[in-house]
Amino acid sequence: MAISFFSKLKEGLNKTRKGITDKIDDLFNNYGEIDDELFDELEEILIMADVGMSTSMKLIEKLREELKVRKIKDSSEIKAVFKDVVKMILNENNNVPFAVGDEPTIIMVIGVNGVGKTTSIGKIAHSLKSEGKKVLIAAGDTFRAAAIDQLMIWGERVGVGVIHQSEGSDPAAVIFDAVQAAKARKVDVLICDTAGRLHNKVNLMNELAKVFRVIEREYPEAKKEVLLVLDATTGQNAVQQAKVFNEAAEISGIVLTKLDGTAKGGVVLAINSELNIPVKLIGVGEGIEDLQRFDAHDFVEALLN
């Protein structure tokens, strides 16, 4: 299973590998001695892959330090050191993998419309059910009728119950009902969808705060996880969305979708480094098994090999 997951990850990162790795390989192979010009060109490659300015500079700085410590002066030996540095950056905020233990868990899923939020919820439910967990979904995005219908379809597909009300209902009321149902049915994991609107930061904060209050009041003993879903193809826009949502909610992890559809997968590094929020799940395909737990080592090996 691990081998097929890794090959799927490698395949999913194909566009990004062409955008970053091929160019980096050309750069390192075409230089003799290491000089400032090489670092400038490397920085440009990273920025073009949406690693972001500040994260690119941080990477270059760490790379310079490591090369000095290891006394490496030939550019052909940089690649291995660069891989280690990328892993260091990613591991700074990825020490807590996505996992559900024995205690009841409530997963709040937030994010704007169109990023793959509903699909991610369905895939997370499938994954957890496959692990033997009893799962329930709450259709808390009541402002978009399609969101409720899509979750109902996913619920049927993966064999998981969906608590819902009609379009336009109070999201907090849906979550209240879902929490009561989760307790009554002794559910292991309750996955809550939320409204995917970024129309107004104050309204967003108020809506999320109301839902969080209901959860805390009705099920204080449950472990809480807040996952923000972002679309990798939007690059730096995803970083900006994360900044806004992070002010509205205490995000515990990122779900990064559509990595297979972009050459700018360097955004994984930008999100992780700039926001101090771990990337916990990544989407590398459209299949039900293609939302994978993020592993920094596997990611770097699949990207830079």
Image: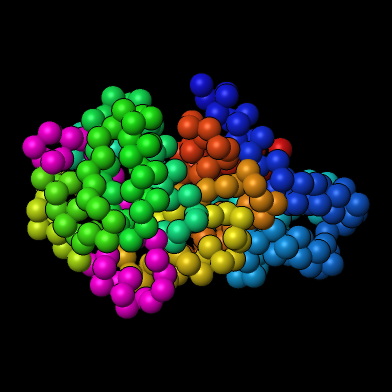
The answer to whether residue 129 shows anywhere in this view is: no
Seen in the picture, residue 1 relative to 204 is either above or below; the reply is above
- The image shows residue 157 at horizontal and vertical percentages of 38, 30
Q: Nearer the viewer, residue 62 or 230?
A: 230
Q: Which residues are magenta?
A: 181-209
Q: Quadrant of residue 152?
A: top left
Q: Quadrant of the C terminus?
A: top right
Colour scheme of the picture: rainbow
- Residue shown at the point (56%, 67%) measured from the top left: 237
Q: Nearer the viewer, residue 76 or 120?
A: 120
| Relative height, residue 97 to residue 288 (above, below) | below
- Residue 296 left/right relative to 112: right
Across and down, in percent, residue 292 comes to: 48, 37
Comparing 72 with 141, the one in front is 141
Q: Which x, y percent locates residue 106?
A: 23, 47
Q: Is residue 244 left or right of residue 286?
A: left
Q: Is residue 10 left or right of residue 200?
A: right
Residue 109 belongs to the span the image colors magenta: no
- Residue 22's place in the image compared with 56, above or below, is above
x and y percentages locating residue 230 in the rendered image: 49, 56
Q: Is residue 193 magenta?
A: yes
Q: Residue placed at 79% from the left, 51% from the top? A: 24
Image point (36%, 54%), residue name: 145
The correct choice, above or below, for 153 with respect to 58 in the image is above
Which residue is rendered at x = 49% and y = 31% of the image? 289
